[in-house]
Image (cartoon, rainbow, N blue to C red):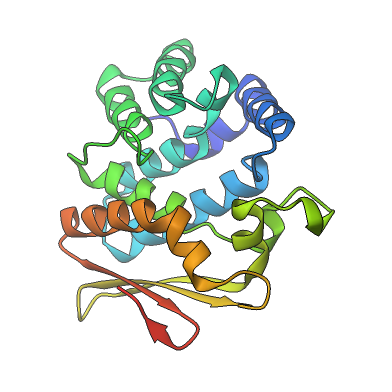
């Protein structure tokens, strides 16, 4: 069983993450580089731990999270499917068992709301971890007058936390937003589909997903 630490040490994978982020940066997208990857990986592993995944499942979750956005190098459209195919080749070169590769491929291929079927717990955890990463530091553009809606929403987030309440079978995304920088409706305009996917992912895990923005419980 390959470990997350072993995958993180592979220079080719590090380079693909960097180049994929550079590509998206040139197109004006928010950060999808190592800061995003590390945040998603931490949150995915936290969820896996709170949900009592096996040690093997935790490693698969971590690897899936670490590699989930490498497909952006081929273009934003269908990047999840492209990334799963790239992951297959990279992991085969590391002599990873195909049974483990298949689980990682499925998670990567289904993490994006434009093309997602949630059939397993690893995929579900990756989705919630990825879609919950909303924060000011993801914004690349320094000139606020040039912000698009994605920039405004991320820049307005003052704090973000993902919390698991096992007793109630609940997963909460808690956000503090400066509504003078971005109205709450902007958030819903671009994130509604992501939150609906997170609710489906939580349901797959046997949990309810809730969203709280400032003092308002919205889902």
Compared with 203, 158 (above or below) is: below
Task: Out of 101 and 155, give the one closest to the viewer.
Answer: 155
Residue 182 showing in the rendered view: yes
Position in image of residue 109 (x %, y %) = 34, 29
- Residue 138 placed where, x, y %? 67, 53
Q: Residue furthest right?
A: 143
Q: Where is 201 relative to 57, above or below? A: below
Seen from the viewer's position, the closer of residues 170 and 13 is 170
Q: Identify the residue shown where x is 21% and y is 41%.
A: 118
Query: Does 47 appear above or below 110?
Result: below
Front in this rendered view, residue 11 or 54? 11
Left or right of 43, for residue 27: right
What residue do we see at 39% from left, 42% from top?
A: 59
Query: Is 120 on the left-hand or right-hand side of 210?
Result: left
Query: In x, y percent, where is residue 198?
Result: 31, 56
Where's residue 128, x and y in %?
A: 37, 54
Q: Residue 9, located in which quarter of the rendered image?
A: top right
> In this rendering, does residue 45 appear at all?
no
């Amino acid at each position: 069983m390959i470990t997350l630490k072993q995958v993180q040490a592979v220079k080719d994978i590090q380079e693909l993450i960097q180049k994929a982020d550079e590509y998206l940066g040139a197109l004006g997208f928010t950060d999808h580089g190592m800061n995003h990857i590390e945040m998603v990986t931490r949150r995915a592993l936290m969820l896996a731990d709170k949900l009592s995944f096996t040690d093997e499942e935790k490693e698969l979750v971590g690897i899936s999270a670490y590699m989930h956005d490498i497909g952006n190098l081929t273009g934003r459209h269908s990047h999840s499917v492209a990334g799963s195919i790239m992951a297959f080749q990279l992991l085969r070169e590391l002599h990873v068992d195909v049974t483990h590769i298949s689980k990682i491929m499925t998670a990567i291929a289904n993490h994006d709301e434009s093309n997602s079927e949630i059939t397993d717990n690893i995929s579900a955890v990756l989705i919630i971890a990825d879609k919950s990463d909303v924060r000011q530091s993801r914004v690349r553009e320094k000139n606020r007058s040039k912000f698009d809606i994605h920039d405004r929403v991320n820049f307005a987030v003052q704090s973000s936390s993902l919390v698991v309440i096992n007793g109630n079978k609940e997963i909460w995304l808690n956000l503090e937003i400066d509504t003078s920088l971005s109205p709450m409706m902007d958030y819903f305009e671009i994130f509604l589909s992501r939150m609906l996917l997170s609710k489906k992912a939580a349901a797959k895990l046997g949990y309810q997903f809730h969203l709280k923005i400032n003092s308002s419980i919205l889902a």
